[in-house]
Image: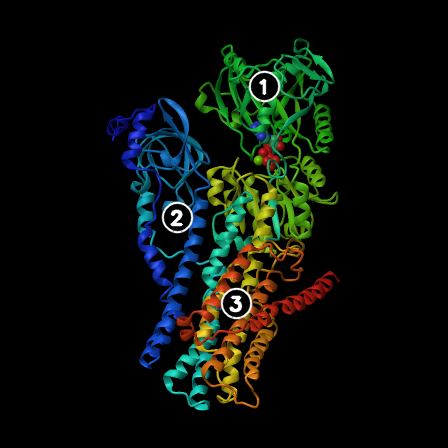
Amino acid sequence: MDINDVYKYFDTKETGLSSEQAAGLLKKFGPNTIQRNKKQSQVKAFLKNFTSLMAILLWISGFIAIFAQMVELGIAIWAVNLINGIFSYWQEHQAQKATNSLLKMLPTYAQVLRDGKPKQINSEDLVPGDVFIIQAGNSISADARIIKSTSLQVDESALTGESVLVSKQAEYSHGVGRFSEANLVFAGTVAGSGTATAVALATAMHSEFGKIAKLTQNQKHQASPLEIELNHLTRQLSVIAILIGAIFFVSAIFFVHYPMAKSFIFALGMIVAFIPEGLLPTVTLSLAQGVTRMAKKHALVKDLNSVETLGETTVICSDKTGTLTQNQMTINHLWLASHEYTVTGQGYVNNGHIQLDSKDVDLSDQPDLEMLLRVAALNNDTKVEQPKVAGDNPKIIGTPTEAALVILAEKAGINLESESKKFPRIGALPFDSDRKRMSTFHDVDGKTTICVKGSLDGILPISDTILDNGKLRPLTEADKEQINEADKKYAAQGLRSLAIAYRDASADDSLPDDTKDWTIENAEQHLTFVGLTIMEDPPRPEIFEAVRKCHEASIRIIMVTGDSSLTAKSIAVKIGVASDKARVITGDELAEMHIADLKEALKGEVIFARVAPEQKYRIVSTLQSIGEIVASTGDGVNDAPALKKADIGVAMGVTGTDVAKDAANMILTDDNFASIVAAIEEGRTVYSNLQKFLLYILNSNMPEAAPSILFLFSRGLIPLPLTVMQILTVDLGTDMLPALGLGAEKSEPGIMKQPPRLRTAHLLNRGIILKAFAWYGLVASIISTVGYFFVNHQHGWPNVALAVSGSVYQEATTMTLAAIVFCQIAAALNCRTKNSSIFSIGIFSNRRIWGGIIFEVLLLALLIYVPFLQGLFNTAAIGWQDWILLVCIPIPLVLIEEIRKYFMRKKVRV
Ligand code: ADP
Ligand code: MG
C-alpha cells in the first residue's frame, strides 16, 4: 500500500491525528494494553486448591467417615478442607493482586504527534492512526508502518526469539518468515539504534504481539528455583506423611484392634499433620508482600524469583554518574591554553556576566573563553524553557552534564536560543558511551563548523591545533602533556572533565559536501582543541551509609564507569567503595586482559574506568565464573546484555531506556544505589521470614503426633489425647493466621551484618529441623501431654482409670488441644527472631501476629463453648483455673528461648 493510502485508510496524515480524533479512536479501539484472559484461569486457580494431594485425601476421608457411620466427622472434615482451600486461594489472589499493581507502577510512554505537535503520552493511549516517533532505546507500543527513518534497527526477539538487530526503513522489502517486512515495526519490540517516525496500524490485542499473547496466555508460568525447592519439599514431606500414616494405620489395626475405617481416620490425622499444606500459597504471598515493600523503597522487582536472588547477592557492579553520585553537575574550573579559571559565582543569573576567580570577566577580551562557551552551548541537546512567571529561573530540560554547560554559557551572556539561530544546526553525530564524544554541525555564514565535546582521551588524539589567545597554533606534545597534567590534577579531586573542540570544515576538503555522507571518521578529525570544562558531581548523601551497610554485609561494590580512571578512583575512595590500594582497570586494559588475570583482579579491590557498556558483560560473566552472585546496574541500550547476564539486572527508572528496563530484573524508580541495598536487605528478610514460617509450621507437627504415638505405644491403654478433628483444627485452623504474620516480619537487626546466603543453602536446613522437632516441638508435646494427664489426675487418676469417653475424656482432650494452641502462641513469638531478643524488636511490633493470636484464642473458645461445635470437635467446657494455667504457658517458653538466643548472640560475636 502506498503510504498515502494508509493515511487515507486511517483518516490521518503525516503530522498526526488531532486530539479529538484520538479521543474518539481511543473510545472505539480501547486502551492499548495486552489483556490476559483472566476468568478462565481464575476458576482454574480456585479449583486447584481443592484438587491437591491433601485435599483429595480429605475428600476421600470424609466419604469413608460417612460410610462408617461417622457422619458428623465426615462433614467436619469436608468443612475444614473447604475452608483451607478458600484460604489458600485468597492468599494466592492477594499475591497476584500485589504483583499486578506493581506492573502499573512503571508506565511506558510514547512520543506522538497530536495536533501537529510532539506530545508525550502514556502508551496505553496510543491509537491506530497515531503518528509516533521511535528513538533508540524506546520500546515500540503498536504495530506501525514506517514513514521515515534514519538507520533504525529493532530488536524483535520478543516476537521471533532471535536477538540480532533487524534494520527497518520506509521502503518496502520482504525477507524470509514473519515480521520480516522492512517497513513495519511491531508492538513488543524495542528500537536498538536510530530513529524513525511511524504511523500506528494496530494496537492492543489486535497487534501481532497481542495475538501471540492471546495464544500463550494459558501457558504455565515458569517455576522459580524457590518454588521448585518448595514443591520438592512438599512432595518429600507428603511422602513421609503418607508413610507415617500407613504405619499408624497398620499399627492401629494390629495393636489396638481398631476397625478399618476407624484406623484410616486415625491415620489421616497423622497424614494431615505432616503435610505442609499452607506452605506454597504462604510463600508466594510473602514474596509478593516483599515485592510491595521493595516498591515502597524505590526498587521495582519484576519477578518474585529475584526477591530470593537479591538475598544471595555478593557483588554489585554499579555505574557512577547518577547512581552513586547525584548527577547534579556544576562547573568549577575552566582550562584554556591562555588561562586557567575557577568559577566562583554559582547559581543562575542571566546578567551577561561571568564571575571567574572572584572577578567579573568580560568575554570581549577573552576570545578563547568565548569560543569555549559558544561551542559548549551549541554542542548541546538541552532545551531552555523561559519561566512563565517573571523572575523565576528558566527550566532546563536535558542531561545534567549538558545543562551545566548551558547554564555557564548563559551566565556569560551566550544565549542558547540566539546562538542556535545565528549558527543553525545542520547535522549531528550523537553521543555514545563507546567513543565518548558528540559532534554537531553548524552553518557559519555558509561554511560548516563542527563543534565537538567529549572525554579528553577521546578528543586529544583527533586534535591537531590548539586555540591560544584567539589564534590557532599546532598542538604540540608539550601542550598535550600540560593539558593532561591539568586534567589529572582535577580528576584527583574527583572532578569530571569534558574537553571542548571545534573544526572549521572549510579549512580542508576532507568533509564531503553531502550531509548524508558525514561520518564519525571523516568529521571527527583535525580538531582545534579549545579547553577543558571541569565539573563536580557530588556523591548522593545516602551513599555513605549504603556503602557501609554493604561492607558489613560482605557485599562487594565494583564501580564500572565511563569516566576517567582518576576521577573514578577519587570518587570511589571518597564514598568508601574502594581504598587507596584499589586497582583501576581501564576499558583498553580490560580488552587486552587475559581471562585468568581478570579473574585474579576481580577477587581483589578493583575499579573499572573508561569502559564501554559492552564490556560490562565480560565483567559480569567473569565474576559469575568465580562464583559470585552479581547485581549490575545499567541504563543504556548497550547495557542490556550485561543486565540480562547479571543475576540481578538493575535498570535506572529515571534515566534508563526502555531497552534497559526490559532487560532488567529490577528497576530503581530513583536511580539510587541506596535503593539496591534496601532491596537486598528486603530480599534477605523475606528469605529469613520464610524460614521462620517453616520452623513455625513444622514445630506443631510434634505435639500433634505425640498423643497418637502415646496411644499406639500403650496399645490403646492411654485413650487418644487428641482426636483427629482436633488435629485438623490445629493444623488447618488455629495455626494459619499467626503464621501469616511471620511472613510480614520486619528485618531482624543484624540481618545486614551477616555474609550473603550461599546459593547452595536450602530453605529447610538441619538447624530448622532440629529446632522444630527436637526443641520447640518436643517441649510442646510434653506440655500438652501433661495437660491431658493433669485433667485426668484431677478426676482421680491414677486411682481411677484414664477416662475413655464421657465428659472427663472430653475435658482432657480439650486441655491437650488448648495447651498445643498456647504452645503455638509461644512458638509464633519465638519464631519472630533467629538470634535477636524479641524485646529488642518490640514484643508488640508485629500486629498481624497478635491479630492471629487473638483470632486463634477466640476460635479455641468457640470450639470449647459452643455446644454444636463441642459435639463435632469432642470438646468440653474448661474452668477458669485451667485458663489461667494455659495463659501462663507461653511465658516460660518465651523466656527460655530468650536465654538461648542470648547465648547464641554471644557465640556469634566470638
Ligand atoms: P558514567 O559511567 O560516569 O555514567 P558516561 O558514560 O556518562 O559515564 O560518560 C563517559 C564520558 O563521556 C564522560 O566522562 C564524558 O567525558 C563523556 N560524556 C558524557 N556525557 C557527554 C555528552 N553529553 N557529550 C559529550 N561527552 C560526554
Ligand atoms: Mg552514564
Judging by the rendered image, the residue that carries numbered circle 2 is 161
Amino acid identity at mark 2: Gly
Kind of residue indicated by mark 3: Ile
Sequence-first disc among 1 and 2? 2
Looking at the image, tell me whether mark 1 or mark 3 is earlier in sequence order: 1
Disc number lying in front (2 or 3): 3
Classify mark 1: helix, strand or loop. Answer: helix
Q: Who is closer to the viewer here, 207 or 762?
A: 762
Residue 177 horizontal/vertical position (percent): 31, 45
Say if residue 210 shows up in the picture: yes
In this rendering, is residue 656 above or below 621?
Answer: above
Q: Nearer the viewer, residue 848 or 220?
A: 848
Using a 10 Å C-alpha cutoff, classify the residue at mark 2 as few (fewer than 14 neighbours), some (14 to 19) or many (20 or more).
few
Q: Nearer the viewer, residue 576 or 862?
A: 862
Answer with left or right where residue 587 lies relative to residue 583. Answer: left
Q: Residues within 10 Å of mark 1 (few under 14, many from 20)?
A: many
Q: SS at mark 3?
A: helix
Residue at x 29%, y 41% (from the top left corner): 206
Return the residue at label 1.
375
Residue tagged 3? 697
Tell me which amino acid carries mark 1.
Val
- Image quadrant in which the N terminus is located: top left
Task: Spot the residue most to the front.
Answer: 880
Q: What is the spatial separation of the Cα atoms under label 1 and label 2, in whole angstroms?
A: 45 Å
Q: Is residue 505 left or right of residue 142?
A: right
In the picture, the quarter occupied by the C terminus is bottom right
> Residues under labels 2 and 3: Cα distance?
43 Å
> Is label 2 in a helix, a strand or a loop?
loop
- Quarter of the picture for ligand 1? top right
Question: What's the CA distance linking mark 1 and mark 3?
Answer: 69 Å
